Image (tube, rainbow, N blue to C red):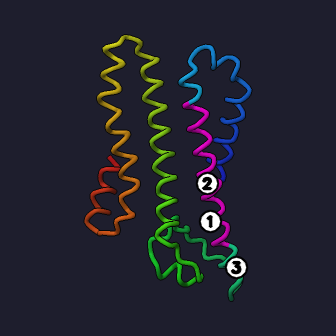
Amino acid sequence: LLTGIVLTLVAVLFIHLIFTAQYHWPLAPVNYVLQISGVTTLLISLIATLHVVLSATLDESKNWPYMLSYIAVDVPPSDSSMSEEHGKEWTTAEKATWMVMNASTSGLIQITHIQFLTLLYPSRLEGRLIFLLLGPLAILSAVMQLLPIHGSEAVLEVASAVRNV
């Protein structure tokens, strides 16, 4: 349900950006390109998430007792017993692709916000400070999206802690 609501809001934002391009582009072309690419990657990510959730729901509804358990679907599945129950376990390549998609979406959206902050504070010093202080955090957060590929429990805990800061 939440994914559908967010998907609807992002689709409306995408349509809004398309129709207001003639006003956004002359004011800040770099920011407009970042916004369009961020919204596009988020839209693709949400569509892929919705596809995975609906596929898992369809697989679950084919077995007795022909109803849904109303438990959230892990994307990507973290517990192999849950995915084996439905006969589908994600390969390492599929999980890596999913995490690269999440990392690129996260990084692009954060870079868009950082670039927008530089528009709010137009002095060169403030712009440099914003990029120097927030840029590495955005990159670090995006890289932390990729660390679950490693599979080590200690690495997963550190990545989760850094990502949630």
Residue matched to label 2: 3
Q: What residue sits right under mark 3 in the picture?
A: 61
Which residue corresponds to mark 1? 53
- Looking at the image, residue 47 sits to the left or right of residue 146; the answer is right
Query: Would you call the spot at circle 1 few (<14 residues within 10 Å), some (14-19), or many (20 or more)?
Result: some
- Under mark 2, the amino acid is Thr
Q: Position of residue 22 (x, y in %)?
A: 70, 18
| Residue sitting nearer the eye, 82 or 103 | 103
Residue 87 sits in quarter: bottom right
Report the side of 65 relative to 99 (left or right).
right
Residue 119 pos. (x, y %): 46, 18
| Residue 139, percent from left and from top | 36, 41
Look at the numbered discs 1 and 2 and tell me whether their residues touch, using CB distance below 8 Å.
Answer: yes
Look at the image and give the residue range highlighted in magenta.
Answer: 34-57
* Majority SS type along the magenta span: helix
Q: Amino acid at mark 3?
A: Ser
Position of 117 compared to 32: left or right?
Answer: left
Mark with earlier residue (2, 3): 2
Q: Secondary structure at mark 1?
A: helix
User: Who's the residue at 63% across and 49% down the image?
Assistant: 44
In the structure shown, which secondary structural element does the residue marked by tag 3 occupy?
helix
Instruction: Mark 3 or mark 1: name the one nearer the start of the chain.
Output: 1
Question: What residue lies at 65% left-to-right and 79% top-to-bottom?
Answer: 60
Task: Judge whether 80 appears above or below 21 on screen.
Answer: below
Disc 1 residue type? Val
